[in-house]
Amino acid sequence: MTFRLSSLVAASLVVATALMPVAGSASDNKIAIISGGPHPYFTPWEQAAADAAKDFGIATVEFKVPSDWKLELQTELLESLAAQGYTGFGIFPGDAVGINSTVAELKDNGIPSLAVAGCAQDPTQVEFCFGTDVYQSAYLGTKALIEAMGGKGAIVHLAGLLVDPNTTLRSDAVQKAVDETNGAVTLLQTVADTDAQEAADQKINALLAAQKDEIGGMIATAYIPSVVSSTALRNLGDKWIKFVGIDDDPIVLDAIRDGFVAGTMAQNPYGQAYISAYVLDLLASGSCTVKADAPFVTTPQTAKFIDSGTLVISAANIDAYQNDLKALTTEIQSGFKDKYLTCN
């Protein structure tokens, strides 16, 4: 791939030079925000890309989705877009380690990349990782669950895809919150690979059918098991099992309003894509570079992490949380240049 990508990028630069400038935009850059595969979490990225292009005067900002959760499909998509003259990429890594050879080659060709919503494993040539602090989110969610359970009982962790680089971090955070109860709460079971519809339906309904009398609470740290669990608990009609999910699918929010779900952890997918497009445009234009001494957070995956924000949605704030996320996005974007970049 090394030779092929370099050759294609060189050819695309010749074509791009012949066509420049693009009229009607403050920037000629072509930015792509790319998911790891098809998943409802990334749905807000499409609108965020369109809004970023309009608000920041970028020639092109596109949301792209590989046809399946396979690293080779994501790298083929990156290769194709680079050949089409794209000048910056925001990437949810299809593999935390495997993506690094591709982003290194992009950087060698003058194309900056960010890891968005999921981090690449250091050492990496992505400029930084911008996403939910998944460890903190899972920890706070489990603490909220334990509080809803009255501080005692057995819980089940419904975890995401094992290929998702965030899954291990979330599992560690759940365990930490449980350990802090000094035995008052126990982790009955972790059910992994539930972030796909068929698997979630099968595993969660089988779990409740076999063990519901043993379970005091459930924490889901992925989108689809949050939705499936909300539906399953409503169908049971029993509010004894406490549940905290993640993300704000309408099914989950309705279950909170009706008392079948204690809460859900809000992430900021719109802000992740919107701010990433803004930053990539600055980097690709050559007007800014990332500060080496910026106040990054160090995680087990990277020394250059920036938190895109999280909060607990409960019955108390369910009608106001979207305004809180919008305010958070504006706050992060407006201060980003001064905090993390050095600009001409």
Image: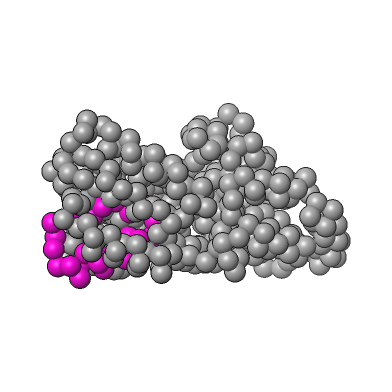
Can residue 97 be seen in the rendering of this structure?
Answer: yes
Seen at 20% across and 52% down, the residue is: 215
Magenta stretch holds residue 167: no
Q: Looking at the image, is 276 positioned above or below residue 86?
A: above
Quadrant holding the C terminus: top right
> Would residue 311 be found to the left or right of residue 34 on screen?
left
Residue 169: x and y in percent read: 44, 42
Which quadrant: the N terminus? bottom right
Query: Residue pushed farthest front?
Result: 210
Image coordinates for residue 181, horizontal then vertical, percent? 22, 33
Residue extent of the magenta highlight: 218-243
Q: Residue at x 62, y 31 (%)?
A: 292
Q: Nearer the viewer, residue 301 or 248?
A: 301
Query: Is residue 236 shown in magenta?
Result: yes
| In this picture, residue 278 sits left or right of residue 6 | left
Figure quadrant of residue 326: bottom left
Where residue 246 sits, quadrant-wise, is bottom left
Q: Is residue 252 left or right of residue 296?
A: left
Q: Left or right of 16: which side holds 190?
A: left
Q: Is residue 58 at least partly visible in the picture?
A: no
